Image (spheres, rainbow, N blue to C red):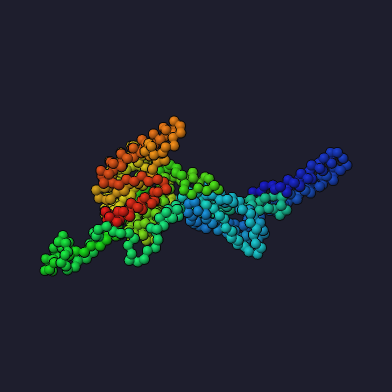
Amino acid sequence: MIVPKFRLLFWFGLTAFPFGTLALAVPDSAQISLVLLTVLLLLILSDAILSFKRLSGVRAELPDVLRLSKDREGIIDLRVRNDSMKIRQVKIGLPFPRAIWSQDEIMTRVLPKGHPVSVFSWPCKALKQGKYLLDTCHMETASLLGFWAIRAHVPAHMEIRVSPNLMTERKQLAAFFLKKRHGIHTQRQIGRGRDFEQLREYVPGDCYEDIHWKATARRGYPVTKMYQIERTQDIYMIIDASRLSARKMESQNQNSETPSADAFTSILDRFATAALIMGMAAEQQGDRFGILTFSDRVEGFVRAKNGKFHYNACRDAVYTLQPRQVSPDFAELFTFIGVNLRCRALLIFLTCLDDPVLSESFSDHIRMACRRHLVLVSMIRPKNAMPLFSDMSAESPDDLYRHLGGHLAWKQLREIENILRRHGVSFSLPDNENLCPRLVSDYLAIKQRQIL
């Protein structure tokens, strides 16, 4: 594809208008004017014909996979291969998806002489987590005489994987993620351990309930059971990816240069970030960590394990998660949990229960899981859900009605909390910024009290 440049328009206007006017005013000079215009047209046409395939020996190469973190700067290493060695300057444009922001949409680069391969860095920033595909690259160079711009669409392939940004939450929990020396417990344990470790001979003062009577009868002398602190337990983050999780939340990392970043942060994004933070916390405590995502069906399931490769698998299962405009099916979810999770585990639900119909369905089906597992339910507090006189800044009747509606929403959530408490389920309602610290705090309290 070729398009005219400013030089062509300039020279055509500089010659066609004056010589055309001269030919009309002075008929004797018409032949000379026609010859000059013909020469100019021949130059323009020959420049277009000779430069039509000027970009045939140039192609762009992008990395196969680019990993970015949401709201953090990243670099794309763009390789330009100039096999023909005929081009010195080229314009490059990448059609970024809407969720990938770059300050430079088009870059002009000079290709070094004598080097067939050039590498350029292209800064960008991801505004939303997910997986995106970049399959083409637009290139432009000038023709031989500079009258035309030669454009081409060069095929390329790059998969952009954007994972949640954990830096803000890690800073809030910096004391917890500090490296500990070997043999030092990360927090004080209340009571003795409950996991059986080994048998030993009875020592005066041992509790009678710890005597292993079968081993005592077999050996002929008293034998006592020894216990150790609970460890390597299963922790599952159960994420709701239904319609209520698609609602937008205010971003913590606001940037004036990218004002559209706030429009991409949803409740589901916050749930994904909290799940990965909990995975790091479980790894720090030596527990196994798994993820279960659902909407109107079970979307994904990663069984609880530990290790770096397992954490990467959990991250890959979370960053591509997108909300669906459907209502969650709690009956199918708890049936799946009952079939696949046979051992006792800590189940942490990240869901939205401010819909009365959904909260009633959740309360009816939670009984299937709380008999075998320890269940925690966490929900981000809606913006205005608070007691009526918590905010005294009502300056108009609209503010008063808004606070009254927030009080009714808060009262409904308190009723849900009371219903879940009767089933032995803990319910928390943290703010958006306190979601991750609250989850880690509740998890450490359970570990400390050895409830699981």
Q: How many numbered marks appear?
A: 0
Compared to residue 282, the image places residue 220 above or below, namely below
Task: Farthest residue to the front: give it.
Answer: 392
Q: Where residue 31 sits in the image (x, y, percent)? A: 85, 44
Task: Farthest residue to the right: give it.
Answer: 28
Compared to residue 226, the image places residue 303 above or below, namely above
Q: Where residue 14 sits in the image (x, y, percent)? A: 78, 45
Task: Give the left or right position of residue 129, taking residue 187 as reference.
Answer: right
Q: Is residue 53 visible?
A: no
Q: Where residue 171 sits in the image (x, y, percent)? A: 44, 55
Q: Where residue 151 sits in the image (x, y, percent)? A: 63, 50
Q: Quadrant of the C terminus?
A: bottom left
Task: Give the left or right position of residue 218, taking residue 242 as reference.
Answer: left
Q: Is residue 198 visible?
A: yes
Residue 360, image quadrant: top left
* Residue under the point 24% across and 60% down: 192
Compared to residue 239, the image places residue 355 above or below, namely above
* Residue under the point 39% across and 48% down: 435
The front one of 51 and 8 is 8
Task: Farthest residue to the top: give it.
Answer: 397
Task: Give the left or right position of residue 255, taking residue 277 as reference.
Answer: right
* Residue under the point 46% across and 48% down: 252
* Residue under the point 44% across and 37% down: 393
The front one of 411 and 22 is 411
